[in-house]
Image (spheres, rainbow, N blue to C red):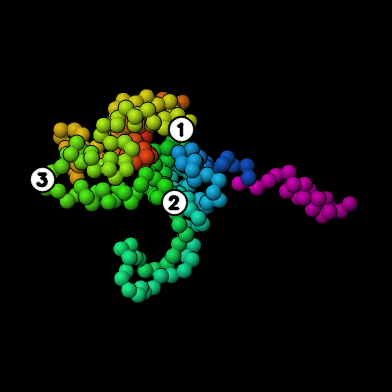
Amino acid sequence: MSATRWLILGLIVLVAFCPPAYEQDATPVAGRDVAQARDILRTLYPELNDKGYTLSVTTPIDYDHPDESSQYFELNVGDRFKDIILGYIGGYQGEKPKDFKPGPIHPKQYLTAIFTYQGSHLRSFSLSGSAVGNPDAMLALREQIRVPEPAITAAEANPALKQSGAKYGLDDKETFVAALPLAKLEPFIGKLSITSVKFGGSDEDDDDVRASSWPDWTVLAKAQQRDRQVSIQMLFEPFKGDLIFLTVKSGRQ
């Protein structure tokens, strides 16, 4: 066999047994973090599972060093990819609906989540959309409460909150705490120990519900993770007790 044929045969063997370098690398951080974020959503909102929905992922990643900076992800759960254009809405004959918006028509989205990671650690996430609480009732309630003068307290606003369909009002702390999804969150952020539970606008120095976190619940906790202890702040809406915001801070409170 000629030297040329031996060389060709050697190159073939080399290619067969030496896969490209990217195949030997560990799973990129971005892909791992998105997978965890998806698991968090499926755990907190099981009613969206097994419906054939699409998860749309939008993220800006450092072009030169994708795994060395903070990772920011926007995840949307909807009928189809959120940026597909299904058609366009132009003019409107007759009286326009209150929510009429001309422009492109996109697939319906039920849940929008924004996640932030630093290295391998989850730093925060926020949740919104029609699957979270009762957005329409919340908007109507805020419009109703914004009108009165002078300032209105959480106690004075509580009847309107309950009448709007909220499950967890000012007087429902015990029931709210019992329903907290701690067991669902612990696989992702560590064993949780609650340090404080407060209903927005219930403090003497925060008694005007129009300028406070009313009607959300604020829960502070500590979590023991494998390599550190962290402080957790969580916000929950009052209609279903859904988690709408979580942030993780290193160190002790």
Taking the image as shown, residue 36 lies to the left or right of residue 251, namely: right
Q: Nearer the viewer, mark 1 or mark 3?
A: 3
The residue indicated by pointer 1 is: 184
Q: Position of residue 182 (x, y in %)?
A: 41, 30
Marks 1 and 3 sit apart, C-alpha to C-alpha, by 41 Å
Callout 3: SS: loop
Callout 2: SS: strand
The residue at the far left in this view is 150
Question: In the image, what residue type sits under mark 3?
Answer: Pro
Residue range of the region highlighted in magenta in the rendering: 1-22
Taking the image as shown, residue 138 lies to the left or right of residue 184, namely: left
Residue 110: which numbered mark, if any?
Answer: 2
Query: In the image, what residue occupies the spot 42% across and 37% down?
Result: 122
Marks 1 and 2 sit apart, C-alpha to C-alpha, by 20 Å
N-term-proximal mark, 1 vs 2: 2
The residue indicated by pointer 3 is: 150
Quadrant into which the C terminus falls: top left
Q: Position of residue 123 (x, y in %)?
A: 39, 38
**For this rendering, which residue is in front, 141 or 236?**
141
N-term-proximal mark, 1 vs 3: 3
Callout 1: SS: helix
Mark 3 crowd level (few <14, some 14–19, many ≥20, 10 Å Cα): few
Question: In the image, what residue type sits under mark 2?
Answer: Tyr
Q: Quadrant of residue 194?
A: top left
Magenta region includes residue 20: yes
Question: In the image, what residue type sits under mark 1?
Answer: Lys
Mark 1 crowd level (few <14, some 14–19, many ≥20, 10 Å Cα): few
